[in-house]
Amino acid sequence: MDELRLLRELGDETPLATPVRLAPARARLLAAMPDTAAPAARSRHRARPRWRLVLGGLAAAGVAAAVTSVLVLAPDQVGGDVPVAKADATRVLHSAAAAALRLPDAIPNPDQYIYQRSQDGPELYESWRSVDGTRDGLIRKSTAGATEEITLPGCRNGRAAVVKGGQVVPNQTEPCTPERAYRADLPTDTAAMRVYLTEHRSGEPGSVNAFAKDVLVLAQDYLRPQSRAALYEAAAQEPGLRAVENVRDGAGRPGVGVAWPSTTSIGPDELVLVFHAETYAYLGMAGSSAVLDLAIVSQVGQTG
């Protein structure tokens, strides 16, 4: 199932999952994961163009020099328009949309992967998801020095490998549908994005809580600049949004939040999207999740 279907099954008012917990097949595989797993060998890099976005002020020094085909942007390189002290929620989202249009535009190849590094409290996650859903991917979880890994089997010819204990079971398959990591069909203008969000809603019609979750699911994944801008502009049309200053994402990074009107105060279950206060790059969800790194890569294990 895809991320929006997962949210639909969880229900409109249930707590929102973290970025990697929304990765295809993760919930099904976690039940069979052992306590520990040996780290996979790091794949060697192949020389081919890659897209990369570093979110939240991660150091980029040396990356561009070592791999000239990688485009690197940190938040101080993505300009916003409105100082946080003067910003309301709508203006924050407008500025985030303007900043998104300054990001490098790249279309992933079908045989590539979307790499994401994220944080949920003390837990760090890395995931490699197949762009077209046909190739085996991987989720790696690190907590207090321990590492666990889960194989995400690709779906080929309607069949996928069976996974137990995070590992592929030889000679066993099951029916499947490809879980694509890249959404090639997303709209690139505001009106069409509003229609898309309405038609693919995860909750009941008119549910602000569900709408916020749907926006969050898309914001934390790889989108082309036009689609990301359209997403933020579509969100800005939601009535009752408010800006929340001095919030922190799941990694503790400070920013300005956009809170949905279904809640009235900061709390563990409130849906507050956090943006960098100066560049308006998307950081994560207040007190819950944080997207630290997002890239298009050529192999599992490759991070750029």
Image (cartoon, rainbow, N blue to C red):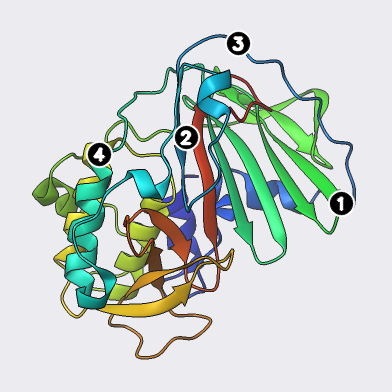
Q: Residue at x 56, y 46 (%)?
A: 23
Residue placed under numbered mark 2 in the picture: 181
Between disc 3 and disc 4, the foreground one is: 4
Query: Percent x, y for residue 126?
Result: 65, 43
Residue 78 visible in the picture? yes
Task: Name the secondary structure under disc 2.
Answer: loop
CA gap, disc 2 to disc 4? 23 Å
**Type of residue at label 1?**
Ala
Task: Name the secondary structure under disc 4.
Answer: loop
**Type of residue at label 4?**
Arg
CA gap, disc 1 to disc 2? 27 Å
Q: Residue at x 47, y 35 (%)?
A: 181
Between disc 4 and disc 1, the foreground one is: 4
Which of these two is toward me, 166 or 42?
42
Picture mark count:
4
Q: Are marks 2 and 4 in contact (CB under 8 Å)?
A: no
As drawn, 226 above or below 64: below
CA gap, disc 4 to disc 1? 38 Å
Which quarter of the figure has residue 25? top right
**Type of residue at label 2?**
Ala
Q: Earlier in the sequence, mark 1 or mark 2?
A: 1
Task: Name the secondary structure under disc 3.
Answer: loop
Which of these two is toward me, 115 or 176?
115
Badge number at residue 190: none
Residue placed under numbered mark 3 in the picture: 46
Residue placed under numbered mark 1 in the picture: 146
Badge number at residue 102: 4
Which quarter of the figure has residue 51? top left
For the residue carrying disc 3, how many other residues have a C-alpha within 10 Å: few (<14), some (14-19), or many (20+)? Answer: few
CA gap, disc 3 to disc 4? 27 Å
